[in-house]
Amino acid sequence: MGKRIQPLLVSLLREEETMDSLMTVWVFFIGSIIGVIVGVALSYRTAITPLHQRIGKLTSQQYHAFMKQYPYNPDNFRYLGDPIDGIQFEEDKILFVWFKTRKTNRTPEQDHIKSLLENGNVSWFEWSTK
C-alpha cells in the first residue's frame, strides 16, 4: 500500500510546483501591466500637465480673436506666452507684443522688460553648440 501512495504523492507535489510556477508568472505579468499603467499616469502628471498650464495661457486659438483688429500681419507674429505674449517681425522693426485684455495690468517683470526695450538695452546674442 505504501508503494502506491508514494507515486501519487510525488505526482501531486509536481502538480503543485507547476501551479506555483504558473501563479508566479501570472503575478509578474499582472504586476508589470499595472506598473506600466501607473508609470504612464505619473509621467503625464509630471510632464504634460505643467506644460499645458504654461503654454495654455494664450494659445493661437485664443489670440486669434485679437488678430482681426491687429494692425500688423499676423503671419509674422510668433507666440511666446510669458513674460510677453509674442514678437512681431516686420521688415523695418521688431516689436515685443503684449495683448492687453480688459483690466489686466503689466506685471513688474513686464514693466522691467518694457523699460529695457525703451532704453535700448537690447542686443543680439548668438550661441553655437558644437
Image: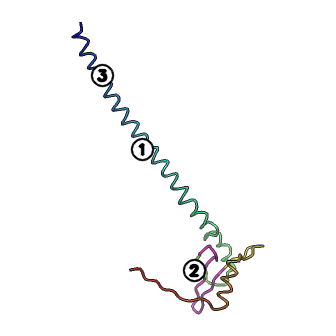
- Residue 114 quadrant: bottom right
Of badges 3 and 1, nearer the viewer stands 3
The correct choice, above or below, for 106 with respect to 47 in the image is: below
List x then y, in percent, for residue 79: 59, 75
Labels 3 and 2: the sequence-earlier one? 3
The correct choice, above or below, for 51 with respect to 115 in the image is: above
Separation of residues labelled 3 and 2 (CA atoms)? 76 Å
Graded by Cα atoms within 10 Å as few (under 14), some (14 to 19) or many (20 or more), the crowding at tag 2 reads few
Element class at badge 1: helix
Q: Residue at x 48, y 51 (%)?
A: 39
| Quarter of the image where the N terminus is located | top left
Q: At label 1, which amino acid type do we have?
A: Ser
The disc placed on residue 20 is none
Q: Which residue lies under the disc numbered 2? A: 75
Q: At label 3, which amino acid type do we have?
A: Leu
Of badges 3 and 2, nearer the viewer stands 3
Specify start and end residues of the magenta stretch as a single range.
80-97
Q: At label 2, which amino acid type do we have?
A: Asp
